[in-house]
Amino acid sequence: MVGEIAVESGERAAMGGAAGGRVAIRVRGLCKHFGRGEQRVSALRGIDWEVQTGELSMIVGPSGCGKTTLLSVIAGILNCDAGQVNIFGQETTRLSDSARTRFRAAHIGFIFQQYNLLPALTAAENAAVPLVIAGWGRDRAVRRASALLDSLGMGAKLGSLPNQLSGGQMQRVAIARALVHEPRLLVCDEPTAALDHETGLNVMNLLREQAVRPDRAVVVVTHDNRVFHFGDRLTRMDDGAIVEIVDQRRGAA
Amino acid sequence: MAWIAVKMLVGDRAKFLGIVLGLTFAALLITQQGSIFCGLMLRTCAQITDITGADLWVMDPSVRFIDDVKPMLESALYRVRGVEGVRWAVPLYKGQARAKINPNVAHGNEPTIIEQVVLLGLDDATLVGAPHPNKIYAGSLRDLRLPDAVMVDHSRLEKLYPKENWADLPRLGNAFYQRFLRRQFEMNDHRALIVGVCEATRTFQTNAVVYTTYSRAKNYAAQERKILSYILAKTEPGLAPQAVARRIETTTGLGARTSNQFLWMTIDYYLKYTGIPINFGITALLGFLVGTAIAGQTFYNFTIENLKQFAALKAMGATNGRIVGMILLQAVIVGFLGYGIGVGLAALFGLRTANTELAFFTPWQLLPVTAAAIVLICILSSMLSVQRVLRLEPAIVFR
């Protein structure tokens, strides 16, 4: 946990310390609709779901099945219409916008399909952004981000701008950015969709090695079936509902 | 976050330059047109600012501006001198005269030149209102007391002597004007002898200014019963000129203004009865609008193109306040740069056009006015961007 963004004592108690296998995310009766009248679309239809700490959980399914919507609501960047989301003991659906923003800054790391790196910042500066948001000074934040990038094999590219990096390198920077503030929850949206097969596998390997920790939960949304085997649990969605949960360590649930 | 905002801003150089150029253009146009406007307005009252030493101008009560001369009887001078609080009072003649340059005297076979001049008659004893010694380029003020002596304004001398070799002027500087000393011409059929060439602030009119003594000016002027144009008065030490002016008005029935009041009275007249402020106001407004359009549009586009980046920052936990702060900081930076460069270019323009016919004067008040206009442009531009970012759903990063 990085200095200023430590989990509150209540949340820590709810987590039951840093031991793995505890419930990290609990979702109950989650509903989300878009549009009105005849245009109304139900993106989530009463989802109940759980993610344990120390596991990499994958949400898979066809386009438009609601997996990204579920991820957005869990990550606290999209409001739900009904239901509850509890992350490490904190019911985030009851938080005000500003409190949820602070919660995200402290406890959630993001990896986006299109990387969303700031084009004017170097790799090290991009990776340092969450620390800067958390109030760190520029130099200190960049130093820490540089060390992390170095451990991800990006030591030679610290000063490179995003347009000087390959897709795989950009995703490594995005992984460093997601992990630099040591969040308890990592949400990844199609992290391999913009990469070729080999690079995608490398990125997923890196993600498993670097992101999965006993006190952290990782949720990956993907429709790339070549990387399904990286998930500890596979949650299959269709038409806004969960249709199957497969624990790949034990078999179908 | 400030450094991230700065890097985002300057990272896209083309857009950054576009925004700065828009604001520069607005600042340049507002300052430059404003300065020309102020320069022109100052010219309307140049003869008031040129005359120093006196606190008060006493005149016919119906006078509305400096060129609106309503002659008074000379006895008015003695009445003013009798008012308590008036330390001294001297006469001033201001009128038009017709100068005729005799070709035989001037330059061989040149045709006769006839030009209207502004004739200023200064008090014989004190020469109050005469040009400051460091504004006399040739000759001496003392010689103004010689018979028929006049001193001529250098800026319009070319109108009286157009065939002179004016190309020598830049090379010779003020020494060039020595050649005009002791030259004679006719003014309203009376002999005039040039004993000096001086600098008079350019007026709104194009006529040369000719200085002479009051008594000689009366000789040059058409014979009328009333000939006294103005009375220049000095108040006793410790007395407020405004109070003495009111006392003069009460006691004599004449109009009395401080130099500053008379200056603004003249400017007000030109503002009210000429189209100058409207014309320049339109140009300055156009500068403001074009600057707003260019800078606003570019700045807004800049924000829109960075919308996904802002959404990513919001998703990662940056609050709306911090994002708005970033946008405002970017607006402040481009505003500061645009203002600085625009005002700098206007100043450069002013320096390059100094000593030309162009009226250009930048009062300090114009700088905060321009700054306020630029701030307004930046606020308008950034507000568009800010409201877009405030409404931004961070979930768009997953789309």
Image (tube, coloured by chain):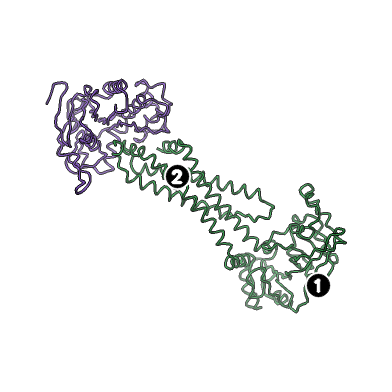
Q: Residue at x 42, y 38 (%)?
A: B5
- Left or right of residue B322: residue B273: right
- Disc 2 or disc 1, which is closer to the eye? 2
User: Residue at label 2?
Assistant: B298
Q: Is residue A191 above or below residue B269?
A: above
Direction front: furthest residue: A38
Using the image, name the chain to which the residue with label 1 belongs: B
**Would you call the spot at circle 1 few (<14 residues within 10 Å), some (14-19), or many (20 or more)?**
few
Q: Residue at x 27, y 39 (%)?
A: A77
- What x and y, as percent, mark residue B226? 73, 77
Q: Colour of chain A?
A: purple
Numbered disc 2: secondary structure: helix
Quadrant, the N terminus of chain A? top left
The colour applied to the residues of chain B in this rendering is green
Q: Point out residue B183 in the picture as x, y percentages from the top left corner.
A: 85, 60
> Quarter of the image holding residue A226?
top left
> Camera-side residue: B250 or B367?
B367
| Residue B270 pos. (x, y %) | 60, 66
Which residue is at the front of the view, B186 or B215? B186
Three-letter residue code for mark 2: Thr
State the mark number for residue B219.
1
Instruction: Using the rendered view, name the quadrant where residue A127 is placed.
Output: top left
